[in-house]
Image: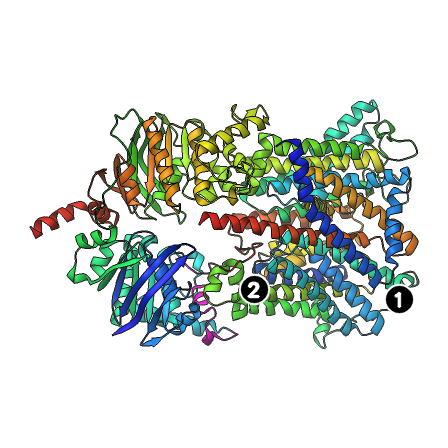
Amino acid sequence: MNVVEMRGIYKYFSDTCANKNVDFSLRKGEIHALLGENGAGKSTLMNILYGLYTYDAGTITVNGARVDMENPATAIRHGIGMVHQHFMLIPQLTVTQNIFLCAKEAGFVLNMPTLEARVEEMNRRFGFRVDPSAFVWQLPVGIQQKVEILKALARNIRILILDEPSAVLTPKESDELFSTLQSLVREGYSVILITHKMQEVLDFSDRVTVMRAGEVVDTLNVSDTDAHALANMMVGREVFLQRQTKPQPTGEPMLEVCDLTVKNDKKLDWVKNISFQVRAGEIVGIAGVDGNGQLELGEAIAGGRTLESGSIRLCGKDITRSSIRRRLDMGLAHIPDDRQKKGLVLQFPIKDNILLSGQRSKQYANGFFLNTKKIEARTRTLVERFDVRPTDINLPAGSLSGGNQQKVILAREVDRGGKVLLAFQPTRGLDIGAIEFVRAKLVEERAKGAAILLISTDLDEIRSLSDRILVMYEGHITGELPYNAPLEQIGLMIAGHDTTTIEKARGDVQ
Amino acid sequence: MNPKKHIKDALLGAWRPALAILGAVLVSALLLRAFGYDAGHSLAMLYDASFSNLRVFGSMLNRACPLLFTGIAVAIAYRGSVFNIGADGQFLAGAIVSAWIGIKGGGLPGPLLILLMVLGGTLAGAAWAFLPGFLKARYEISEVITTIMFNYIAIQLVGYLVRGPLRDMAQAEPQSYAIAAQGWLSYLIPKTKLHPGFIIGCIVAVVIFILLFKSWFGYEVRAVGYNPIASKYAGISVTRTTLATMLLSGALCGLGGFFEVAGASHYLYESLSSGYGYTAIAVSILAGNNPIGVIFSASLFGFLTLGATAMQRVIGVSAQFTSIVQGIIIIFVAAASVKGLQKTRRKAEKGGH
Amino acid sequence: MDQVSFFLAATVRMATPLMIAALGLVVSERAGLMNIGVEGTMLAGAFAAFSVSAFTGNYWLGILCAMLAGCVMALLFAFTSITLRTPQIVIGAAVNMLGSGLTAVLFRKLFFDAATGGIQVATFPALPIPLLHAIPILGSILFNHNVIVYIGMLLVPALWFIMNRTSTGLKIIAVGEHPRAADSMGVNVFRTRYAATLFSGVLMGLAGGYLSIAQANSFNVDMTGGKGYIAMAIVVLGKWTPGGVAGGALLFGGANALQMTLQNLGLGIPNNIIMMVPYIVTILAVLTASRHRVIDAGAKGIPYIKV
């Protein structure tokens, strides 16, 4: 019996179609995995089901009745709850207070002992051990997630959506989570699991729906499929890939990362003992799904995050403890992951953004004073060469489109003459024209002898630009592949499926 | 940017505050009517109080002088995203040290004494801003509470000095001895009491403007003020820049304190600052946090203050009427500028996905 | 002994307005608003209480109008900062100027003659609590005050209860800490923030009214003399909890009373130096608060935009 039926769902974000004619159904008492790459439209679909997003077409049926999902309150009324990737908890309140905030049965005056007893009761029933009177800020992430689940369960939820639940958990916490989910299913709850990890699908799910580029590829029983087939569906068929780079000899190692360990914001080791080199004249691509430590790795190299252990060398010199200023001076160019937050001052005009980080250099300043003429002349040249539009250099960067903002950053970083270029998601969210432009510039820099580290979740990008591909999964580099490695193999590896087991599986089949 | 474009921008940028001032004057006039005063007569009075002759014009500029310095100080702090509500305390710290040097340094020749007072006042202002600035820069402790606390400590310090160690017993009210006569700044125009403070304040405004918009230091201050994270990734030390911004802001307030003591009062007394530091927030906002704009907004507020004194004398409305006008101006200007901000943001969001 | 109980009773009297205003601030700051317009809001309350009490002879009506006046000033702040999303510190500064200016102008207009001739204004009398006030020492310290002091005392446990034990309190904390999460749980962020601001305005008005018709029987221009700012400091000192705020207010009230007592004793420590102590203590308190975890609202001063 289907508890949820979504039919012909369409969702547009301005011009892009995030969900295209999506059908999805959930059976009572199953764990249903929703598998796909970043941007495949999984979270969008589930946010629609939870009433957070509106949808442009389609119907939703819950327990046999048509439901107009207006807001989360509607969803909750129909027994649908969602645990977001970024928890929606109030750190300053206790576990119990979070669970019963806005719950009708709590009333005006909260009877804390009674409510806490109810939490204890749920603890017993679902096998949790959450201290009802602890403040949420005191709890580790794994427990906070349980509070989120309890919050949903306390509202008589029967259908639970979890968005990448294991992304923030340690392996042990993940195991606990999945045994919890399995016991919930045994009690008759139905679970939707948004994930990009193959193993979670294979080990814990009953059915799986694979999405790619906003569309459903297929829905299958997990027992009828294997990692191999799922990976193929997830990343798509082997397309004819236009290599944009020609082979060229590489030079000295310009960026050397050795045994690097970095913590994330939650103080957990998130990059674990990573070592690699990037040589002059090559592009090394780091492939992986968001949240596997790329952000922390990038920030550690750029100098924005302190590292726990290991060392980094730039152009042969140790920069492990160097300031960002020193790294830039030594030849690091940086295209950050979040251009609006880390790469630009949106209120500044284009020319002042070109100036950013060069304001004390001889190129732009005469001692203490800025040389406006030089800055403007250089900006005009760069705006023309990098095809930034509109060309008015006095326009605030905030008024430019994403692609043109990225071109401004690229122009600045390339123009500084860096020998090492750290390109983090350089084309995320750009239109086709801008994507091609940015990629062509990276290739041009490689030809000039720059050492480029490309971190991207876009496998096409990684494969068309990189000379070597490193796969990052859960903070480790799980393998190195040549640029012409089969897409399916990369697909398996970014989903945490070791190539060796695949090879073995293949052997078994043969 | 060429000068022509600057002027064009300034004129284009000025219509919003101009409209806000016009609206505020209108609302204020209506309030006056509502309170039963003759609004037309009051406005004429206001004008006469500052422009009827050279003497009153000089007084107006003198009134504007402390607001000019504290206003520039607040403006530069705001540019660096520091809410310096402590301008009052920094102003008083400057006044205290200037007065102390002026009183104790009677044996020194005039130029040397004045130089020492300037240095002492400026450094004292910066010193008074140091701790709040350091706590903000290093530990992200809100500067709002700490600067206000330092204001009150400064006020109590003035009270202690003029009732204790520096008290001139010859006076009935508690006040300090006058500073040595050679430390008095001379009046610029005969028959007026116009001291050089306002003129020098205008020069300082231009200097700070150049510093903010034409030097790498000012560029870094503004970059950190707008986007500390991007600034960090561009190799700018956010901590150092924030602290430097605060110190500069404090130093300017201290300099204002020096001019008030050496140019206007010549001694220290308890209500030396009638909340200049708080009014400075209004002055700076009205000027769009532009140091050169502060020259005009400080003058306007000086004009209002002086005019209100005349209005109280002649038609009986309390001189505090200026506070109402200032309050309304701030609300109008702030509300008008927020609209503008939202427009640019929306544009950015649209472009940036 | 007399000196000590006089000192402690004075401490309670001096602490009351600071405490009431600071309790109001606890509510609005925990809801995520940074209102530095306490001074102006208190002045509005003080003047409303004084003038209504003077014209009607009814101090209860006076204090009611004080709370209403505080509420009106808070509404101005709420509308500009929550709805228009104007920078809150700027609006707070404007509220202070408006409060100071309006009360001064109206005072001069309405009471110009009275100010020189002296005017009878109905004020809250001391209301010894039966039996309790007769307890030696403690009676005169705690139970021989006017009714607003008692209201202040009761407000502390009442607000503690509201903030920690009712769904309203949790909603206030939620919208201050993580408005988006609160929204996702079904809390109306705008309504909660408005309500918290208006409530805090009522308490600020009450604190102002206490100054003019309970502690004194007159109104002076700018009679709050920085008490609004001190209330803000007390909130930090008391770490945003009603109990902590009560303690902080007693510290400031005690410093004030100490200064009076020392004056009486003639020990020769200058008043101004004693008066500095609470401010220095506050700075130290802010320092230590930051070393632990400050309980300040996470989203303070940031307007909420629903997507």
Residue A302 x %, y %: 41, 36
Whether residue B119 is in magenta: the answer is no
Which region shows up in magenta?
A: A87-109
Q: Amino acid at mark 2?
A: Phe
Figure quadrant of the N terminus of chain C: bottom right
Residue B149 x %, y %: 67, 47
- Report the residue at 64% width, 68% height from top: C155
Q: Residues within 10 Å of mark 1 (few under 14, many from 20)?
A: few
Q: Is residue A207 left or right of residue C191?
A: left
Mark sitting on residue A233: none
Q: Nearer the viewer, residue C150 or C178?
A: C178
Q: CA distance from mark 2 to mark 1?
A: 44 Å
Q: Quadrant location of residue A227? A: bottom left
Q: At numbered mark 1, what does the secondary structure look like: helix, strand or loop?
A: loop
Q: Nearer the viewer, residue B264 or B18?
A: B18
Residue A18 x %, y %: 36, 57
Name the residue tied to disc 1. C119
Name the residue tied to disc 2. C190
